[in-house]
Amino acid sequence: MTRSEIIEALKQEFSHLPGTYIEKSVYEVFSCIAETLASGGRAEFRGFGAFGVKKRAPRVGRNPRTGKQVKVDAKMFPSFKCSRNLINRLNKW
């Protein structure tokens, strides 16, 4: 599901609200999640899951074209952990 599909679904569900409010709300939620992750925080949604940040250690990589070793710096990357409720819902337990 894309962001625009989420907005359209919410517009149908909450037809009494102006579409611009719904769009701004969706963009604000995603923006808050991104800002929280950028600052090293965690965004948790009970019954759905949690977004967090993990650190990838520095390492020595290899250029596939030349075979030459290159230094790869440490990196931060987003991660997502499903809640038990979401896993059960997907597996219909």
Image: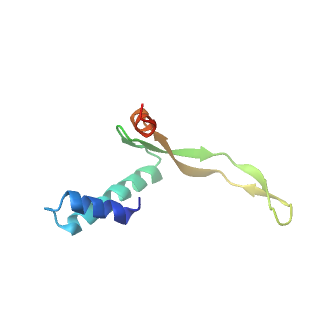
Residue drawn at (38%, 41%), measured in percent from left and top? 48
* Residue furthest front as drawn: 92
Residue 19, position in %: x, y? 21, 67
Lateral position of residue 8 relative to residue 59, left or right: left
Q: Based on the displayed image, in which of its 4 quarters is residue 2 positioned?
A: bottom left
Count of marks placed on residues: 0
Q: Residue at x 41, y 58 (%)?
A: 1
Residue 14: image location, x then y, percent: 18, 58
Pick whichever, 57 or 66, lies toward us: 66
Question: 70 or 5: which is nearer to us?
Answer: 5
Q: Residue furthest bottom?
A: 20
Q: Position of residue 46 (x, y in %)?
A: 34, 38
Q: Nearer the viewer, residue 91 or 50?
A: 91
Q: Is residue 67 above or below residue 93?
A: below
Q: Residue at x 13, y 62 (%)?
A: 16
Counting from the top left corner in percent of width and height, residue 62 is at: 80, 57
Q: Tell me where residue 67 sits by quadrant.
A: bottom right
Q: In this view, which residue lies farthest toward the top? A: 93
Q: Is residue 4 above or below residue 37?
A: below
Query: Is residue 65 shown left or right of residue 42?
Result: right
Colour mode of the rendering: rainbow
Up the image or down, 1 lies above or below 83; here it is below
Instruction: Give the quadrant of the C terminus.
Output: top left
Residue occupying the far right of the picture: 67
